[in-house]
Image (tube, rainbow, N blue to C red):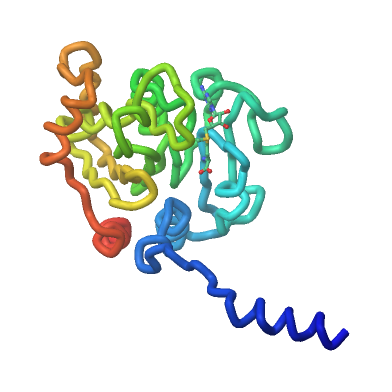
C-alpha cells in the first residue's frame, strides 16, 4: 500500500496540466454574442430561431424559456418548437416572427443567402441576425462540396459581399469562433441579392476581400450588439 501511495505522489508531482487555450478569446463564442443580444429584449416575449442545430448544445444553452426558442434542422424529428425540415421549407410555411435569429444550417453560399433573405423577412423591429462561419480557417475549410476537414465553414464568406453592398443595414463580423456575422437591418433595408456577378469564386478572392471586411474584436462586437 505504501508503495502505491508513493508512486501516486511521484506521478502527481510530474503531472502538469496543459491549458493552452487563450483565455480572453476562448471565453467568447457565438453563444456569448447571442445571449448578449437576448438580454436586450424582454425575456418573456423574446423569440429566438436557430437554423441548423448540430449537437443542439448551442440551442440548449440559449438563456430563454423553452417555449420562446425555435429550431430548424432536417436531421431532427419535429417535436414541439423543433421543426425537422430544411430551412427553405420552414420559411415557406412560416408566419411567425423572431427577435434573434442564428443562421448556421447548410454552409453553401446560395443557401445562406436564402436563409438571410427569409430571416430578414421574419425579423421583428430592432431584431438582430447572427451568421456563423464567415471567416474560413484555410482553403480546404471553405471548399464545396464538404471535404474531410473537421472544421468546415463552407463558402459562407461570399455573403460578406452582399452584406457590405446592402442598404440600411448594419453589418460587422466578430473575430471569434470562425467569424460570427452580426446583422442589424432597418425597416427599409434593401438586401443586395447579386448572386452571379460578385466575381467571388476562389480562396484567393477571399484573401483579397479579407482586408475590406468589417472584422471587430469580441469587445467591440458586444458593444455593437448593445447599440
Ligand atoms: C454546423 S451544424 C449547426 C451547429 C449549431 N448551430 C451550433 O452552434 O453548435 C449544421 C446543421 O445544419 C443542418 N442543416 C443542413 N442543411 C440544412 C438546411 N437546409 N436547413 C436547416 N438546417 C440544415 C445539419 O443537419 C446540421 O445539424
Question: With respect to residue 160, does 58 lie above or below?
Answer: below
Q: Residue 92 location, x and y as percent?
A: 51, 18
Left or right, 42 with reference to 225: right
In this view of the protein, can residue 116 be seen by the observer? no
Left or right, 115 with reference to 79: left
* Residue furthest top in the image: 196
Residue lying at 37% horizontally and 38% vertically, measured from the top left: 133
In terms of image quadrants, where is residue 146? top left
Left or right, 3 with reference to 107: right
Q: Residue 3 location, x and y as percent?
A: 81, 83
Q: Nearer the viewer, residue 217 or 182?
A: 217
Q: Residue 123 location, x and y as percent?
A: 40, 38
Residue lying at 42% horizontally and 55% vertically, measured from the top left: 29
Q: Residue 66 location, x and y as percent?
A: 66, 50
* Residue furthest front in the image: 3
Residue lying at 61% horizontally and 22% vertically, measured from the top left: 85
In this view of the protein, can residue 56 be seen by the observer? yes
Residue lying at 58% horizontally and 31% vertically, measured from the top left: 72
Question: With respect to residue 7, does 214 lie above or below?
Answer: above
Left or right, 66 with reference to 140: right
The quarter of the rendered structure image containing the N terminus is bottom right
Amino acid at each position: 500500500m505504501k508503495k502505491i501511495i508513493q508512486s501516486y505522489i511521484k506521478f502527481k508531482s510530474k503531472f502538469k496540466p496543459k491549458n493552452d487555450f487563450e483565455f480572453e478569446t476562448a471565453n467568447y463564442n457565438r453563444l456569448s454574442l447571442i445571449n448578449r443580444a437576448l438580454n436586450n429584449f424582454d425575456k418573456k416575449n423574446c423569440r429566438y430561431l436557430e437554423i441548423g442545430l448540430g449537437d443542439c448544445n448551442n440551442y440548449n444553452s440559449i438563456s430563454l424559456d423553452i417555449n420562446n426558442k425555435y429550431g430548424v434542422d432536417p436531421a431532427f424529428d419535429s417535436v414541439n418548437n423543433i421543426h425537422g425540415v430544411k430551412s427553405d421549407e420552414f420559411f415557406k410555411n412560416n408566419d411567425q416572427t423572431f427577435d434573434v435569429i442564428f443562421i448556421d444550417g447548410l454552409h453553401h453560399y446560395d443557401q445562406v443567402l436564402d436563409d438571410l433573405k427569409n430571416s430578414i423577412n421574419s425579423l421583428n423591429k430592432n431584431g438582430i441576425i447572427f451568421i456563423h462561419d464567415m471567416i474560413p480557417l484555410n482553403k480546404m475549410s471553405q471548399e464545396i462540396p464538404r471535404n474531410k476537414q473537421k472544421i468546415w465553414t463552407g463558402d459562407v464568406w461570399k455573403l460578406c459581399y452582399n452584406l457590405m453592398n446592402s442598404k440600411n443595414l448594419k453589418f460587422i463580423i466578430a473575430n471569434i469562433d470562425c467569424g460570427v456575422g452580426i446583422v442589424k437591418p432597418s425597416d427599409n433595408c434593401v438586401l443586395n441579392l447579386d448572386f452571379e456577378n460578385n466575381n467571388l469564386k476562389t480562396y484567393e478572392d477571399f484573401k483579397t476581400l479579407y482586408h475590406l471586411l468589417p472584422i471587430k474584436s469580441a469587445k467591440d462586437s458586444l458593444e455593437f450588439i448593445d447599440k
